[in-house]
Image: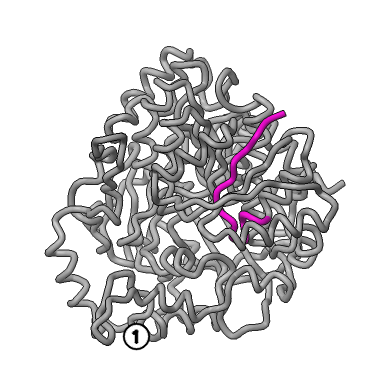
Amino acid sequence: MACVLQIGAGGVGGVVAHKMAKNRETFTRIVLASRTLDKCKKIADSIREKGLGEIEIDQVDADNVDDLVALINKYKPKLLVNVALPYQDLSIMHACLQTSTHYLDTANYEHPDSAHFEYKEQWAFDARFKQAGLFALLGSGFDPGVTNVFCAYAQKHYFDSIESIDILDCNAGDHGYAFATNFNPEINLREVSSKARFWTSEAANIKDTSLESNLKLNPDLQEDSIYRKFERAEKHWTQEVRNKLNKQSALDEKSGLRSLEQGDRTKTFIDEAKGDLPDLSLKNEAYCNGEWRDVAPLALMKEWDYTEVGVKNSYLLYHEELESIVRNIKGLRKIRFFMTFGESYLTHMKVLENVGLLRIDEVLHKDKKIVPIEVLKTLLPDPASLASRTKGKTHIGCFIRGYKDGKLRTIYIYNICDHEECYKEVNAQGVSYTTGVPAMIGAKLIVENKWGVGCAKNTSLLSNGDSIESFNAARVALNKDMPRGGENQGIDSNHGSGVWNMEQNDPDLFMSELNKQGLPYVVLDVFSPGNFKVLEDGRK
């Protein structure tokens, strides 16, 4: 049916390539490219050995737009699937614009020099993708990705309005090592050690960032007693980092302001990246008729009882899908994200943080500049090497409260994935599998012309009685905080083209594919803890 170019050959990339090879009626030509050709060859060999046919491989520097453009022009794919590093999202999107190629990724853009995650740099591409008649799908992993679709599906079928969403990510796998990360250590540890935040429309003192104020807004949570046990007011390296941030008045080329060669001229294409590095101190910010509330890293938690896994300590984090879901789910008053961590993981990570090994700035070592977290990444096990030794399950879901026909109800939608079964199928552990399969599904829907240009969007995002015209007018008002180029994000003004998040597309097709492709979902109508009715079970 179509040629697809995949960039990225890590653990997730291996899953995506294997699953595309298992859907040959859709992906008739698969090209896998990475900076490291040997990684591509290893994946291609595995696909061949499993009787799934041949894929083509190539080499590319995903930071270099000219390299990317040359590669895309060589194969002329319908779609580019980006499972490279999130630092490379912008350069790849720019290359797609230059070559008239549709785009998909699994994670939002991250600044290499600060642990700062947001969609705005990518939403700024919306006008250009619309003008070019191209479709860009952001965040087609599990979280973000499937969790966004779970929320959209619940809104479409089970609620008139949704008041609160808790996204729960539990990995109960055991790889047998004292400390390791299940995906890229640099990305994982930056994400987990960053400040947490949640969004609420509840009135509160926006200047109050105290833990006490956030506990009042979240009475079901409690203070952590593990990670912060070894917290101190000041670390020996804090002032050095603070001085660097104070001196840097603008993002340099490495952190988002990229100078891109276009023929004989250089174009700076992310004007919005100019300015100070993001402030990493705690602060509350107005956003979408509510506010973001910042919380110190891993400061708040609660115990959740995960079906087939058990009770686990779950920590409040910030995760990128919150940023878009807040804009798209009707009636929302609060949204939070939780991830499970054991005592051993938290203790190891806190020690690494305290000694400075989670730093992402350059330091001098024997007259050479090094980045501590990159050194740590070299020392830790390759996440791909964990696949064959990981046992246990993942459990990821959305706990959603809202109203249907005037009555309050709670719906829980979740998936459970077995690490050992994932390894048998595609030589990967469950964390890679749960990200890679949704990426393939998103690509499948685009290639089959079910999502994308010429396809209807998720009309359940409209409030009851809303016309498209009134929705669009409200969206323009909502988008006043958007960067230049993103003012009309979420408005279908050119036959479905533009930059779109997962929940803005019709969820039913994606949910159906989850059951077919190895990530079946379950829907529960929850009456009280332990008292529920199964409404859907894709495993049967």
What residue do we see at 48% from left, 27% from top? 100
Asked whether, in this view, residue 138 is left or right of residue 488, the answer is right
Query: Furthest residue to the right?
Result: 540
Residue 246 screen position, x and y as percent = 13, 64
Query: Could you tell me the amino acid type at mark 1?
Result: Val
For the point 33% across and 74% down, which residue is it?
371
Q: Residues in magenta?
A: 1-14
Residue 11 included in the magenta stretch of the image? yes
Considering only vertical position in the picture, is 54 above or below 405?
below
Q: Nearer the viewer, residue 468 or 83?
A: 83
Helix, strand or loop at disc 1?
Answer: helix
Q: Is residue 339 above or below residue 463?
A: below
Q: Is residue 98 visible?
A: yes
Q: Is residue 247 left or right of residue 524?
A: left
Q: Which residue is mark 1?
A: 355
Residue 29 image point, x, y percent: 70, 37
Compare residues 22 and 228 and report the one nearer the observer.
Answer: 22
